[in-house]
Amino acid sequence: MWRSMKPSEWIVIGEIVGTQGNRGEIKVIPYTEFPDRFSKMESVRLFEAKKDTPYGIFPLEGSRYHKDFLILKLEGVDSITDALQLKRMLIKVNEDELMPLPPGRYYIHQLIGLNCITTTGQNLGVITDVLQTGANDVYVVRPNPGVTKLREILIPVIPHVVLEINPVEGLVLVELLDGLLD
């Protein structure tokens, strides 16, 4: 069944990992395929780890890249001491604020909870995670009882295996490779 987001669910797009300089800039690892989005944002919503309510919303005064990090300057964060207090905080957005994806591409949170059905009609189980391996993604499926003795099924996301993704219907249609359930 399609899982809609609750208001308390947020998507992480960055993590504050340190400070940059002594003027209150923060160093961020972007967790988004669209890091340029930060240059268009007016503010960022910060969350403490494992919290569902925002720590605060900070107007964004500037953003730039430095090596592999994004450097942000937040309004009201004007010293290294201020910036250090934000270390390990997460930058999150709600689903309405996500960047649109091209047709046929999905965010991981849209895939979690979908049922994997084979072309023969067998309901394998539910996607619990998506591994990003570099070559191709891999769906981690918690199998339904009696499907396999394995604790999880790993389904490579390649065109001749994953035939259809239908979040509205809550399913992913797959053609199993030989030996995948052994």
Image: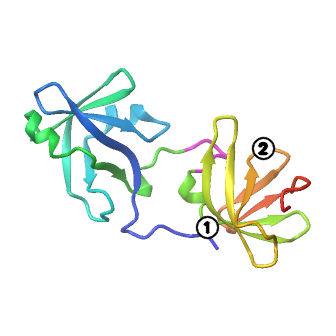
Residue 70, located in which quarter of the rendered image?
top left
Residue at image point 15% right, 46% down: 85
Viewer-closest of 2 and 27: 27
Where residue 165 appears, x then y in whole percent? 72, 56
Residue at image point 61% right, 67% down: 113
Quote the CA–CA distance across marks 1 and 2: 19 Å
Q: Is residue 71 above or below residue 30?
A: above
Answer few, some or many: residues within 10 Å of disc 2's Cα (few below 14, many 20 plus, some between 14 and 19): few
Residue type highlighted by circle 1: Gly
Marking on residue 158: 2
Q: Is residue 173 above or below residue 97?
A: below
Residue at image point 57% right, 44% down: 101
The mark nearer the N terminus, 1 or 2, is 1
Residue type highlighted by circle 2: Ile
Residue at image point 56% right, 51% down: 107
Which residue bears the numbered disc 1?
113
Q: Does the magenta stretch include residue 34?
A: no
Q: Is residue 106 above or below residue 28?
A: below
Answer few, some or many: residues within 10 Å of disc 1's Cα (few below 14, many 20 plus, some between 14 and 19): many
Q: Quadrant of the N terminus?
A: bottom right
Stretch of the chain drawn in magenta: 101-106
Residue 93 seen in this snapshot: yes
Q: Does the magenta stretch include residue 104?
A: yes
Helix, strand or loop for disc 1: loop
In this rendering, position of residue 140 left or right of residue 159: left
Judged from this view, the residue extending furthest toward the top is 67
Where residue 53 appears, x then y in whole percent? 27, 64
Residue 75 seen in this snapshot: no
Helix, strand or loop for disc 2: loop
